[in-house]
Image (spheres, grey):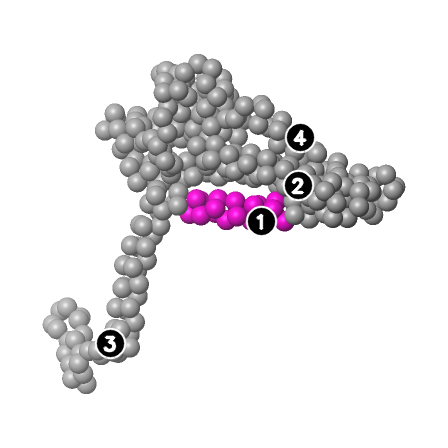
Amino acid sequence: MFTLTSRGGGRVVAFGRPPAAPADDQVSRARRLAREAVEAAELRAHQTRPDVVALRVERVRGQVDRLCWAGIILGLAFTMTNVQSFASASTPPWSLPWLAAWLLDPTVSLVLLAILRAEQVTARYQVRTGPWVRRAKWFTLAATYVMNTWASYAAGSLAGIVLHSVPPLVVFVAAEAVTDLRDKLTEAVTAAFTEAERRALPDKSVNVVARVHEPLARTASKSKGSGARKSFADYLAEARAAWRPGVSVTPLWVREVTHCSRGLSSRLAAVLAGELADAEGGDES
């Protein structure tokens, strides 16, 4: 290798050896990483789309529904024998009263299942049901519990009371919990959809309306005295309409103008404050 030094510059230039070329495996690895980066960015863009986010929560809701339905049906099937024994009392086996006793538990269970199936649809559209629906559900659950544990209470068997109390109580708790879970999962879908749209369209965040479920006529729900349940977008629209310049958007203020729940007011305040901040930023620009 030879070196030459330029006059007055002090620069050293090397000759005689060509620059080392990158190894083939390094080039292929760099290309592979670049290709993976492009694929990851594309996948991320699709995963954060509002419809994809909402679809994920919808799938979770479907799984919750199936598991709860399986537990409720198994619990009601377990109680069938005890209810039949309670209804048949001391009647001879295979007599007409003994056979008719098998119809008592399915009668109560089918009514309960019909109510739960109806609540599954109303919770999806966030429509509030009347008080008689809840009363009918509680009555059928209470009747199942009493008929299932009557013999154990009469005999004074603590083990029998515990054994025959668990399935009806599980059905009761599951029937109440699954309704609230569907309602909250619907709100989660709406919130996820709205937030994803706000990130995707920051300039149009004030006009964002979350359309997550199938279209439902709102004319009757907005009339006074209607039993329809408001969605997240409805509460947000009310808060937007009530806001005036100089008003500080807080969860307490949101609850006062929309009469929403405490947990929902925090998310409404955050979304509305973000929209107002984006709008102010657009006006200044």
- The segment highlighted magenta reads 56-74
Q: Secondary structure at mark 3?
A: loop
Lower position in the chain sequence, tag 3 or tag 2: 3
Mark 3 sits on what residue? 22
**Alpha carbon of mark 1 to alpha carbon of mark 4: how far?**
21 Å
Question: What residue sits right under mark 2 in the picture?
Answer: 103
Percent x, y of residue 166: 72, 45
The answer for how far apart the CA atoms under marks 4 and 3 are is 78 Å
Q: Can residue 12 be seen here?
A: yes
Going 82% across and 42% down the picture, which residue do you hit?
90
- Mark 2 or mark 4: whose residue is earlier in sequence: 2
Say what amino acid the circle numbered 3 marks.
Pro
Which sits in the foreground, 187 or 43? 187
> Which numbered mark, 2 or 1, is in the foreground of this view?
2
Mark 2 or 4, closer to the camera: 2
Identify which residue is drawn at 80% across, 46% down: 92
Residue hosting label 4: 139
